[in-house]
Image (cartoon, rainbow, N blue to C red):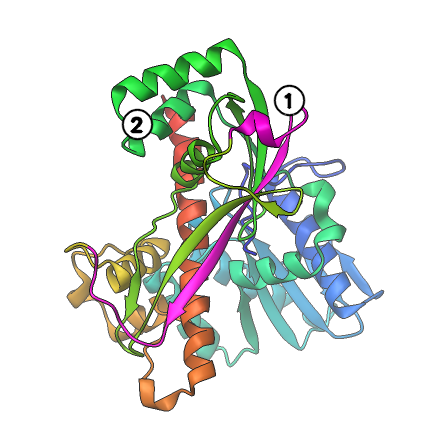
Amino acid sequence: MKYVFSADFLKILPPDTNFGQAWETICDILLKAEFNDGSQIRLKAPDKGIDIYSQRLKNAYQCKSSELAIRGNIDATECIASIKSALTVKGAIPWNKYFIASNANFTGSAFQRLQEFIKNESLNCEILGPDYWSDLAEKYTDKITRYLDYRLTVTEQEVIEAFKKARYYDQYVQQYSKEISIEKYIVEVSNNRTPISLRIPFSPNLTIENLLDVVKTILGINMDRNNFYDIQTSALPSISLIFEQIKQGFSKKVGEVVSDKEPKFEFWIKIIWEDETQKPENDNDTNYMNLLHYKLARHSCCINPLISRSREELMFAFEDPFMPYSRESLTFEERKNLTIKRTEQLLQNYIWENVITSKYGQENE
């Protein structure tokens, strides 16, 4: 499961007074849980380039954040300034390794500039980016639950728009809109790939398939198959709705399945893979173009000038598991695991991008 730490979902609780401090709290809690380190302390401002310090391990952490998280970037200049400050106090606060703890990524050029500085200074420094903290959050969810709120309220208009995007005929969209306005349940739908939970106004007279289409559209799930030509495999998602641990039939009405007006469903995404590529169902075979678009967009690159990018920037964009492999270098089980992992990350990335983009779009209207 993938976690994103943006201002939309990370709560600022006392004594923290701003987003940066709230991010430090998350890092502090997760690091203590991971290393069971009672010697770990937070340094108050002015922090001299160190926000969190482990007296036992002699590790120094500087927390850098963007309120936009995956849609934002980390400033290399600020990171370099923090490292320089930490170097000036190394006598008083002795550290062996320096970590940059970030909830967002660097652009390719910013990452290169930071790495050059680290190399020139011969520093033992490591970047702990969004994926690192997502993994720890999944491992120690109970430690940080009170600081996070991934519940999103969907409006009736958004439900109607979802029906339109799902290509329902106008007559059905109007009918379903009327059904929801007459009697509505507030259906809560979680999913098995992200911690996002949707609260959706929905009519008990509409079907499980109708609800499935709305959730799929709001989360931005693409049902197309992805071909991975380097390892010659493919995969696609299979979706269903689970209520009280039972997979529900598409034709059932919501009111036939649930017993109260605030039911909780789980949107279950299963990944089906094949050890071969498949002919695309349409001409838009998006596998690596989707991958490139997401990876490069994350680092403020754009896809059009791709060929003009340096190899270093491109290789940075293709972080594991998206580094190119050869089919012959992998066993059957390794190809299976890599294909599923790639597909899962694509699904997670699209869900977060779609949800956050929609949220910011609403705020800017």
Q: Which mark is residue 164?
A: 2
Which residue ends up furthest to the bottom in the rendered image? 328
Q: Considering the numbered disc 1 on the image, is that residue within a helix, a strand or a loop?
A: loop
Residue type at the position of mark 1: Lys
Percent coordinates x, y for residue 169 in the rendering? 26, 25
Percent coordinates x, y for residue 272 in the rendering? 42, 64
Label 2 vs 1, first from the N-terminus: 2
Q: Which mark is residue 156?
A: none
Name the one closer to the observer, 229 or 107: 229
75 sits left or right of 140 in the view: left
Q: Look at the image and tell me in which quarter the N terminus lies.
A: bottom right
Percent coordinates x, y for residue 160 in the rendering? 37, 22
Q: Please say if 268 is above or below 324.
A: above
Residue 166 falls in image quadrant: top left
66 sits left or right of 28 in the view: left
Residue type at the position of mark 2: Lys
Q: Residue at x 16, y 67 (%)?
A: 307
Point out the stretch of residues depicted in magenta. 253-281
Q: Considering the numbered disc 2 on the image, is that residue within a helix, a strand or a loop?
A: helix
